[in-house]
Structure formats: C-alpha cells, structure tokens
Image: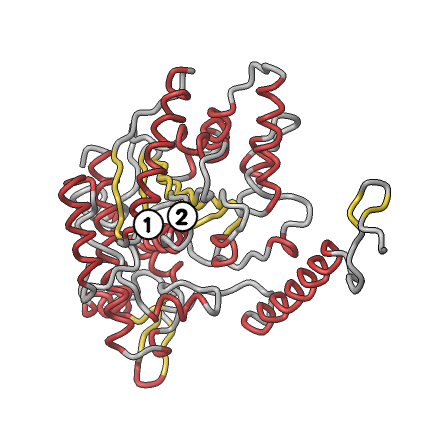
Amino acid sequence: MARDHVDGRPEKRQGRQQRIDQLVGAHAGRLSQRLQAHRAQLFPESTRRELRRFTSGEAAELLGVKDAYLRKLHLDGRGPSPEIRAGGRRLYSHADIQSLREMLEAGAKTPGTYLPGRRAGDPLQVICVINFKGGSGKTTTAAHLAQKCALDGYRVLAVDLDPQASLSALHGFQPEFDLLDGGTLHDAIRYEDPLPLSAIVRRTCFTGLDIVPGNLDLMEFEHETAGALGRRSSELFFTRIGDALSEIEANYDLVVIDCPPQLGFLTMSALSAATAVLVTVHPQMLDVMSMCQFLLMTSNLLGVVAEAGGDMSYDWLRYLITRYEPGDGPQNQMVGFMRSLFGENVLNHAALKSTAISDAGMTKQTLYEVERSQFTRATYQRALDSLNAVNGEIEGLIQAAWGR
C-alpha cells in the first residue's frame, strides 16, 4: 500500500513539477515586460507622456473667457503664442493656459478670478479619496479630480497611497521599472532615516500637478508600524503623513490622496492628515452594504486615534455616486435611499458610467488627456460634462473651506 505521508508530512501528488512561487514570478516578469513594451509604444520618445494641446475653445472655457478674447490677446501680442495649424486653428499647451491665467489674474479686479488657489492664511486642503471595496471608482475619481483642479489653476499634489499603484500608472509611472530604488511616500514616513518629501515628488505632464507615486514598498509601513506599536514606541503613526506634507505645503493649494482599499495604518495616517474626505460608492446593494461595514470600522478606528490625540476634524465629508447609470431603476432606488439617509453629504452630481473613461484607461490615460476625436462626440461630451460637474462641485467645497 502506497504511503500517504513521509516524516509526518503529506506526500506531494505526482505531476507537480514547478513551484508556484516560480510560476507566479515568471508570469509577473513576462507581464511586466509586455507592459513596458506597451508604454514604449504609446510614448516612444522618453516613455513619458506629453499632454495634448487644447483648442482655443477649450482654453477659453478653462479660463472662463470668450474665444474671441483669446484671439484678440494673440493678435495684440499679449500672452504666449499658440500653435497655429491648418485653417488658422489655434492650439494651446497647458503651460500656455497657465501663463494666460497668471497674466489675466494680474489685471483682474477681483483676486482669485483666474488663479483660484490659496491666499494668505488659507490652510492646505488635503482630500482623501477612500473606500475599501474594489470597483468603486476611487482611483479614477482621484485622478480626474487632481487633473481638473490643475487645469483650473490650482497647484496640486497627487499622492498614490495604494500599493497597487493605479494612480501612478495613470500618470505614466510603472513601479517595477521607474521606482527600483524607492520613491514612494514610504521613504518620507518610515521610522528610520526618512527622506524629505520634496526628494520624492515627481512632475507630471500637467502644469501645476505633481505626484508622489506608489508601489508595494508602501506595505512596509504597515509592518513597521505594527513593530513600533509592539515595542511601545513613542512614535505616533497617525501623524506621519501630516508631518511629511507640512514640509512642502507652501508649494501647493491642495493634496489629493488615493487611499488603499483597506483600513490599515496608512489609511488612518492619511485620514489624520486630511481636511476633507470623499467616499466613492457604486449604487448597488452589495456595495452599499460593504460601505456600511467600512463606515462602522472607520468610526471605531478613528475614534481610537482621536482619543490618542489625533485631529479628526474635517471641513467636509461627501459621498460620490460613481459608475452611475441613470436608466437603471435599482440604481436610482439606491441613490434615493442614500440621499434620504445622508442628505447634503451626498454630492448633487454623480459620475456617470462611460465607455469613454474606460477606453481612455486602456492607454493609461484619463478623459482630460485623450483626444476627443477618438470618441463619438456625444459619448465624449456626456462623460466630460459629468466629470466636470462632479469636480466643479468639489472645487466649490474647497473654496467654501477657505471662506469664499
């Protein structure tokens, strides 16, 4: 009779010739190389993207002026000169638009007309985008919010706190190639020999938008903090992110943090640094049930942080309905249910589900980056209007927090 055990251990079945760690490692290597080749194909010159140029109509809309006024500025030789293409079509880079903002702001009667960011005495705004259920649109929301605020003239820092690094990928960073020697927020918040946050910040192709990318190194903070707590260290984990941001806060108007999909030490530290919280939720029963568990756990954990001296005061908390389909009856019922429970804490506008947004993601881009010619006009405009409405409402909350 065949032996089932050897030295008390189950005998392995015949036919298993390869260790699972080696197989997974081989798959990861092949996938990583293919993704790198894909990126090089999309952005062949430096494997870093260059933001598209904006039509004069788009530039005028971003600035809040008429296209004819931009044309007059150009003819008068004021401001940057746009690129002129066939038929006299004028195109502006994002840097051109920012230069126009600065010029127009200098002559504006009301401060903040063209540059809406912080003024003397205004605190840095730190917005945590959070949920611990996948598919809620958290990263998509964070990316489009950060980019739209930069397009509107704010100085923005995006922080990828998710080890999966999707926000980083949307901004052209592939962790296993671009962050071989660190370069995540972990380097600035670790307990031993932390780096200044300014040494980690990277520029993006958007003028006024910088990023702190992420990768799996962020998980080290969870392990290190558990060890520090076990040693009864005097280090306060929940102040680490706030302390790091304080080093560079003079350079930015707002910070958008894409939190990981779990309530660990990273998330609690981010929430302790935050001035506002944006919870993304897909309007389906299972997602709302998951959000209920998330809220209960958040309340309990942050209550402990507050008792330990953490600052848990916020300017605002809002729920954003994401991947919303207006023609879906059950979704509409769920949205009505949430509005009846949470009232004004649910944003008035919802982020619509759109093939334009998902198709843009196939090339690791957002809707603000892709050329609108890649989509049917109605599809693109519907998605863009939805995103602009959501982000405009959030910008209104930012302004209100500054007393404006």
x, y percentage for residue 93? 39, 65
Spatial CA span between label 1 and label 2: 7 Å
- Helix, strand or loop status at disc 2: loop
Above or below, comparing residue 100 to residue 132 in the picture = below
x, y percentage for residue 215? 58, 47
Q: Please tell me which residue lies in front, 16 or 191.
A: 16
Which circle marks residue 287 in the picture? 1
Amino acid type, label 1: Asp
Q: Is residue 100 left or right of residue 188?
A: left
- Tell me, yes or no, whether the two marked residues, 1 and 2, touch with CB atoms within 8 Å: yes
- Helix, strand or loop status at disc 1: helix
Q: Which residue is mark 2?
A: 133
Q: Please tell me which residue lies in front, 404 or 158.
A: 158
Question: Mark 1 or mark 2: which comes first in sequence?
Answer: 2
- Give the residue at x 31% y 49%: 281
Q: Residues within 10 Å of mark 1 (few under 14, many from 20)?
A: some
Quadrant where the C terminus is found in the figure: top left
